[in-house]
């Protein structure tokens, strides 16, 4: 397990952040639930995903077998967030080209947001993609997901408008970002 550092919250109190590790097989059902909830589908009045999207969100085992299924856990080992780091040859990639690793389904439980969990998952995904020898890490996100887009830019991702061809569920096209590894 890779511990993250402590930081101060907005009131100046010390907040323990999470550790990021690979999910265990006995956690796949919970990871699927965290992914579903992290995308807001468990909230009252939320639009429910279509059958194919629901299957993707819930099927953590397939994502684990296509690369690495990362989980962010608190000090009690409770799963607070997840991300799927996929190898270029995975059937689940939609943006990867030329051997790029791809990040899919970054999700944080609604009650755990704004604690650095998404950033911790992103940093670990960047490190693992580099360790695989991938030339870059690519991902996509909703065109109006400005909070995530700011995180990606802050971490050094570059937006690639020329790759933005996949329609988004609420109109427009998914925004594509790429982190190139320095050799």
Image (cartoon, rainbow, N blue to C red):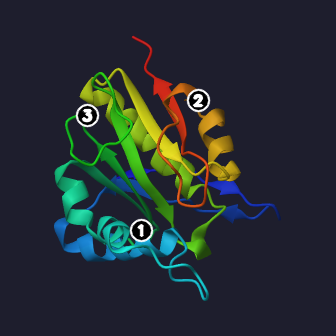
* Mark toward the start of the polypeptide (1 vs 2): 1
Q: CA distance from mark 3 to mark 2?
A: 20 Å
Tell me if residue 183 comes above or below residue 180 in the rendering: above
Q: Is residue 76 visible?
A: no
Q: Is 43 situated above or below 77?
A: below
Instruction: Tell which circle, 3 or 2, labels the residue nearer the N-terminal end.
Output: 3
Residue 72 sits in quarter: bottom left
Q: Where is mark 3, residue-wise?
A: 88
- Is 44 rendered above or below residue 27? below
Disc 1 crowd rating (10 Å Cα; few below 14, some 14-19, many 20+) is many
Residue under numbered circle 1: 35
User: Residue 49 — which label?
Assistant: none
Q: Which residue is mark 2?
A: 161
Q: Secondary structure at mark 3?
A: loop
Residue drawn where x is 56% and y is 45% of the image: 173
The residue lying furthest to the right in this view is 11
Which mark lies nearer to you, 3 or 2?
2
**Relative image position of residue 101 (x, y in whole percent):** 33, 34
Which sits in the foreground, 61 or 75?
61
| Element under disc 2 | helix
């Amino acid at each position: 397990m890779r511990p993250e550092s402590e930081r101060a919250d907005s009131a100046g109190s010390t907040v323990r952040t999470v550790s990021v590790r690979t999910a265990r097989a006995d956690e796949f059902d919970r990871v699927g639930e965290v992914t579903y909830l992290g995308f807001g589908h468990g909230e009252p009045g939320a639009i429910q995903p279509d059958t194919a999207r629901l299957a993707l969100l819930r099927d953590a085992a397939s994502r684990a077998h296509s690369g690495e299924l990362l989980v962010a856990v608190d000090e009690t080992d409770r799963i607070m967030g997840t991300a799927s780091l996929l190898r270029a040859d995975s059937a689940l990639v939609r943006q990867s080209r030329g051997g790029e690793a791809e990040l899919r389904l970054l999700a944080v439980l609604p009650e755990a947001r704004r604690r650095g969990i998404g950033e911790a998952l992103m940093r670990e995904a960047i490190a693992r993609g580099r360790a695989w020898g991938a030339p870059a890490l690519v991902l996509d996100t909703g065109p109006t997901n400005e909070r995530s887009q700011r995180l990606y830019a802050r971490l050094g991702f570059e937006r690639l408008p020329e790759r933005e061809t996949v329609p988004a569920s609420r109109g427009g096209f998914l925004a594509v970002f790429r982190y190139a590894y320095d050799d």
